[in-house]
Amino acid sequence: MNLLLKKTLQMKKALVVDDAEANRIVIGAIVEKFGLAVDYAEDGDEAVHKFASLTPDIVFIDQIMPRKNGSDAIKQMKLITPNFTAILMSALTNTEDIKKIVDSCGADEFLPKPISQTVIADVLKKYHIIE
């Protein structure tokens, strides 16, 4: 196996899910800076479909999206492969609602939008995605 292919196979993978293209691009670009292979989805339905074939190490997913919200998508992903890191994102500010949503879907963490490079780096380190 050539070295490039071997390195690609060993790369950690991330799935970035948001109905807003600008958010997908920004978060994906930050995640790529840390050496992860990144794929994208526009809504929860597409995310579940891609998740099944990609088996990413970490998923950054928006809560409020058309067709299927982030928490419902996480529930379905956890049925496919329970051992991945699910990061739910939103501009929601009600901490009680956020806690209920996170607890009900099995997300590992909630990040309020907008999300900085520093916060993403901290999350990737916390969940041992990067060193």
Image (cartoon, rainbow, N blue to C red):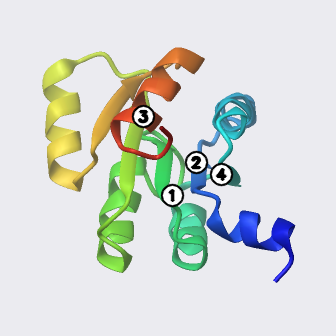
Mark 2 and mark 3: Cα distance apart in space: 20 Å
* Rendered position, 62 above or below 94: below
What's the residue at 22%, 53% (across, down)?
106
**Which comes sooner in the sequence, label 4 or label 2?**
2
Q: Quadrant of the N terminus?
A: bottom right
Residue with the mark numbered 2: 17
Kindly identify the amino acid type of the residue bearing the numbered disc 1.
Answer: Gly
Mark 4 and mark 2: Cα distance apart in space: 6 Å
Mark 3 and mark 1: Cα distance apart in space: 25 Å
Mark 4 and mark 1: Cα distance apart in space: 7 Å
Q: Are marks 4 and 2 in contact (CB under 8 Å)?
A: yes
Helix, strand or loop under label 4 = loop
Helix, strand or loop under label 2 = strand
What's the residue at 59%, 42% (across, down)?
18
Q: Point out residue 20 in the picture as x, y percentages from the top left corner.
A: 67, 35
Q: Point out residue 100 in the picture as x, y percentages from the top left corner.
A: 14, 38
Kindly identify the amino acid type of the residue bearing the numbered disc 2.
Answer: Val
Q: Which mark is residue 42?
A: 4
Residue with the mark numbered 1: 44
Residue 95 quadrant = top left
Residue 122 quadrant = top left
**Which comes sooner in the sequence, label 3 or label 4?**
4
Mark 3 and mark 4: Cα distance apart in space: 26 Å
Residue with the mark numbered 3: 125
**Which comes sooner in the sequence, label 2 or label 1?**
2
Q: Tell which tag, 3 or 4, sits nearer the viewer.
A: 3
